Amino acid sequence: MPIPTPLTLLGAPGSPYTRKMVALLRYRRIPYRLLVGRHGDARALPKPKVELLPTFYLPDANGTLEAVVDSTPLIRRFDNAFSERRATPADPVTNFIDYLLEDYADEWLTKAMFHYRWYYAADIERAGDILPRWTAVTAPEEQMQKSKRFIQRRQIERLYVVGSNDTTAPVIEASYRRFLAHFTGLLEQQPFTMGGRPSAADFGLYGQLTQLAQFDPTPMALTLAEAPRVYAWVDIIDDLSGLEVNDADWLPRDAIKARLGDLLGEVGRVYAPFLIANATAMARGDSEVRLTIDGAPWVQQPFPYQARCLQWLRERYDALSGPDRAVTNGILSGTGCEVLFGP
């Protein structure tokens, strides 16, 4: 069924996935209507089974409005519905690598985002002051202080969800610093992850970096000191509506290994072993995921959604043709990512 515009979505500035999708819509030149806070028009809209931001309100097969979440399939749905300026490459190999990097941004880099925001005192204080005001800027100060304490307590108690704790903190922070170095090196060669035009991976990375690089004090100071190019890139991605693109702008598959090898190596170094251990723990019904990442211990509760992420990655890998899979294997060889798709 066609999707009418403007698209309506519920979101918030402090949500990296809201920022991801709003930047995507700007780039795609798809008209949209962003609702911030569940009040006014938002109260009459359907609620999703799991309340996540952003929530889009789209027609189902019968034309009935339904609440839809999860940015990754939504990007593909919009690519199918709106033909101009697609955010996913047509080449199957390039498309697969883009999907893998988007998944890394959404599911591993978000660990750094959540960790820094709710682990350090200065970041906890700033988030507590600003987050509730984004959705209720005119509320009385007494209410804001109550909201601040509630949000801080709730989110700190949820650090276990992303695996942030005293044991894993050094792993998360070292990985973020390496990401900054690798991404800086990539940006010295090309403006976007997959070449000369933005892709889903860019919007995934951008979403997390709107918080890590430009809002939360601790990672923002780190980003400015070690990766000012990345800080500036976030501002660029915010609104790409004026960028003209064509299919020749995509990075050719034979250049992917040279350009993206270091970044894929980081995915293989930290995210790949976690995905496998998490899926194993889920299958066994274990109460903890325990493994060694980058020579250091990692422990957290199993994450059901990220077990599905591994399943979806493998399904996309299996859907590649034999020749495309061989090229993909060559790109991933030696990065550590190959273990995700081994026997």
Image (cartoon, grey):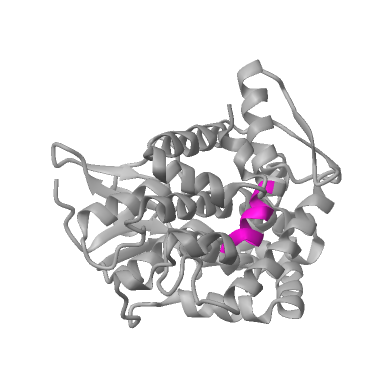
The location of residue 231, given as percent across then percent down, is 62, 77
- Position above or below: 227 against 17: below
- Position above or below: 296 against 278: below
Q: In which quarter of the image is the C terminus?
A: top right
Query: Does residue 267 show up magenta in the picture?
Result: yes
SS assignment for the magenta stretch, majority: helix
95 displayed left or right of 204: left
Q: Residue at x 42, y 63 (%)?
A: 199
Residue 155 at least partly seen: yes
192 displayed left or right of 333: left
The location of residue 63, given as percent across then percent down, is 14, 42
Q: In which quarter of the image is residue 216?
A: bottom right
The residue range painted magenta reads 260-268
Q: In which quarter of the image is the N terminus?
A: top left
- Position above or below: 33 against 2: below
Q: Which residue is drawn at 47% across and 55% down?
A: 98
Q: Quadrant of residue 65?
A: top left
Q: Which residue is drawn at 55% across and 35% down?
A: 341
In the displayed orientation, state which residue is furthest to the top: 284
Q: Residue at x 33, y 66 (%)?
A: 25
Task: Please tell me which residue lies in front, 55 or 231.
Answer: 231
The location of residue 286, given as percent across then percent down, is 70, 20
213 displayed left or right of 68: right
Task: Please tell me which residue lies in front, 114 or 79.
Answer: 79
Query: Does residue 153 show up magenta in the picture?
Result: no
Residue 161 at least partly seen: no
321 displayed left or right of 270: left
The location of residue 172, given as percent across then percent down, is 76, 53
Task: Please tell me which residue lies in front, 89 or 328.
Answer: 328
